[in-house]
Image: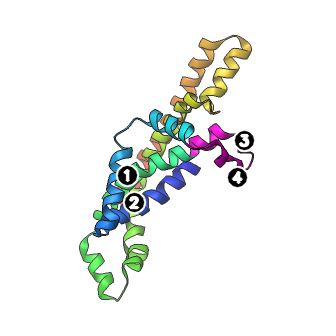
Amino acid sequence: MVATIGGIFFGTLLALMRLSGKAVLTWPATIYVNGMRSVPLVMVILWFFLLVPAGFYKYLPDGANHRAEYSAVITFIAFEAAYFSEIMRAGIQSIPRGQVFAGQALGMTYAQNMRFVVLPQAFRNMLPVLLTQTIILFQDTSLVYAIGAYDLLKGFTNAGKIYGRPEETYLLAAVVYFVICFALSWMVKRLQAKIAIVR
């Protein structure tokens, strides 16, 4: 949840930077988004875990004992922001330009136009895609095994070691992941159909 909220927040900022038309904002955002989308997630996880100084985590609550978990959250926010940025950018561009011009005609600034006219409609259009990306993020959390962070899969792995049933627990983990992702996907489809009917 934290990674999703953080990813959407920073992704929105990146999208606005890319759509600003100012080179000083457009180029850094474009390089960041394309760079993040061009490398495997597990590599980014390892980068953050190995390159961020351990002393950084001591400023976070119980950071010394949860370095891997904090590193994973920071990584997912930074990585998913690039993907959410493209979703946000497409959603913003889907709003008819006439509405933007209408806001400008009313004397709204760029920020006011985005806040009151464009973004509310864009979020509604993008909601199914944002939720789908969140499901993908949930599936990707299993990759934190690379740095020893505790997640759902590691919980099943530890249970398998304790009870001496690794095969059964991995199978149960697959079933749990499937049930959760299938239920969320079904909810997204229902939401998409509902939004389509309203339109």
> Does 22 appear above or below 90?
below
> Does 126 appear above or below 38?
below
**Circle nearer the viewer, 2 or 1:** 1
Q: Which of the labelled discs sits on residue 64, or is there none?
A: 3
The CA distance from mark 2 to mark 1 is: 9 Å
Labelled pair 2, 1 in contact (Cβ < 8 Å): yes
Q: Which residue is mark 1?
A: 32
Q: Quadrant of residue 15?
A: bottom left
Crowding around mark 1 (Cα neighbors within 10 Å: few <14, some 14 to 19, many 20+) is some
Please state the extent of the stretch shown in magenta in the rendering.
52-73
Crowding around mark 2 (Cα neighbors within 10 Å: few <14, some 14 to 19, many 20+) is many
Along the line of sight, the residue nearer the viewer: 102 or 180? 102
Q: Amino acid at mark 2?
A: Leu
Question: Does residue 57 show up magenta in the picture?
Answer: yes
SS of the residue under disc 4: helix
Q: Quadrant of residue 18?
A: bottom left
Q: Is residue 82 shown left or right of residue 139?
A: left
Q: Is residue 112 shown left or right of residue 97?
A: right
The CA distance from mark 2 to mark 3 is: 31 Å
SS of the residue under disc 1: helix
Residue 179, percent from left and from top: 54, 31
For the point 70% across and 10% down, the residue is 164
> Does 59 appear above or below 135?
below
Q: Which residue is mark 4?
A: 59
Residue 149, percent from left and from top: 62, 33
Q: Which residue is mark 2?
A: 14
